[in-house]
Amino acid sequence: MADQVTTELAQPNLAPIPMECDAPHLKVTGELPRELNGTLYRNGPNPQFDAPGAHWFVGDGMLHAFHLENGRASYRNRWVRTPKWLAEHDAGRALFGGFGRKLPGAPAGTTDDGGVANTNIIFHAGKLLALEEGHLPTEIEPGTLKRTGYCDYNGAIKGPFTAHPKIDPVTGEMVFFGYNAAGPLTPAISFGSVNASGVVTRFDRFEAPYASMVHDFIVTENHLLFPILPITGSMERAMRGKAPYAWEPEKGAYVGLMKRNGSTKDLVWFRAESCYVFHVMNAWEEGNRIIADVMQFEEAPLFTHPDGSKTDPQKSRARYCRWTFDLAGNTDRFTQTYLDDLTGEFPRIDDRRAGQASRHGWYACANPDLPMFGALSGIVHVDGNGKRLGHYLLPAGDTISEPVFVEREPDAAEGDGWLLAAVWRTRENRSDLAVFNAQDVEAGPVALVHLGHRVPDGFHGNWVGAE
């Protein structure tokens, strides 16, 4: 694991930046759309200190806020001041290794809370929440990016909370889950919902077939689906100093399905060929079928087999794939059909169609003609059947983040709006915020907001419009 992590962090834009800063007046090339009034919040790992054996996934969270208003742009970044970050800041060194484990020699009395709040940031029911799947949501003060504490909805939830909750665009309800719900590396899964007013209306739990890293899940109008895929968790491995999470394809792929208003007693388990999925694009119901579009890996990247051997890099790339579940059939199998062979990740839709059939989707893709296999360096626009509607590639060497969709106005047609993505300019070693017309990505950015430093490769972000 340590060698793998060293290799990861040797990639230039995965390394952390050492500073927090404010840039109130940024240069803009092109013209920022006047409809864009609000803030793009992005989150990602930015370790405060190097830690031996620490996986990239567990670096301290750093928030990046691009504020756009009336054609002008500003920027602010801040570390999320978690208990772990504060303890290490005071100590002047790393106190935690991978996945919340304290390092030998950490002072007595060091917090047990290794949370990093580094994966996503969302806005729901008046709260801005930084998320990572091992801990409760962390509430952030909009604008200042100050951490105000954990959000447990007045004690109504406890334990881990996914970095990928789903917000129902019809009801405003936020549906969530958490793995390791009975403690580290356990097969228990919790789930629940928070209504549009910020009140928890359900919190429940069930046992999965095995302990798994469950990064994302699937929500449709009437159903919840929980993928249990074989990046497995093992306390026995962790106690021996081995990787707590590893790729074990022999465990098989499971997806648990239940009604949103149903009982865990009614959970039905579907099976398929082993695979891994970090991210779901969207899912919806078609009669007696559920369709889910995902970015599927044949073998998991960034993790090894239990014996430390690496997965096959040719199979450790995600491709746009459609899962189909037959609710009326006599089979417990679901089908997996690749819709494109292009390597890609970080799929997004017009969130006003979340959980419903959608006609537009976008994801970051790799350039198949370049030797830097796997680097995300473009955007693909697809229709509701996976057909490419547009494809844009950056200059060689540059990389791009998750493209976030922002509608032109609240009642605009689906897909009518803008895509916002951070772009790393490798030759200049700095970043831009790129703004694309979502319906014409091939034309390239309509505007670029120029930073004087780089934004490290991160995970997810969301747009919060001005009130």
Image (spheres, rainbow, N blue to C red):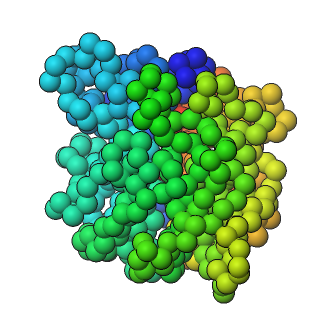
Q: Nearer the viewer, residue 201 or 462?
A: 201
Farthest-out residue, right: 369
In the rendered image, which quarter contains the C terminus? bottom left
Q: Nearer the viewer, residue 2 or 47?
A: 2
Residue at 30 percent across and 33 percent down: it is 114
Residue 146 in the image: state x and y as whole percent.
24, 42
Farthest-out residue, front: 236
Residue at 43 percent across and 80 percent down: it is 262
Above or below: residue 133 compared with residue 25: below
Task: Tally the numbered discs.
Answer: 0
Above or below: residue 434 compared with residue 98: below
Instruction: Look at the image and tell me whether residue 381 can be seen.
Output: no
Residue at 72 percent across and 54 percent down: it is 273
Q: Nearer the viewer, residue 249 or 423?
A: 249
Residue 392 in the image: state x and y as whole percent.
75, 49
Q: For this view, does 373 lie left or right of residue 41? A: right
In the rendered image, which quarter contains the N terminus? top right
Residue 306 in the image: state x and y as whole percent.
59, 30
Q: For this view, does 122 lie left or right of residue 328? A: left
Instruction: Look at the image and tell me whether residue 340 can be seen.
Output: yes
Above or below: residue 169 compared with residue 126: below
Q: For this view, does 142 lie left or right of residue 227? A: left
Residue 109 in the image: state x and y as whole percent.
14, 24
Residue at 67 percent across and 84 percent down: it is 328
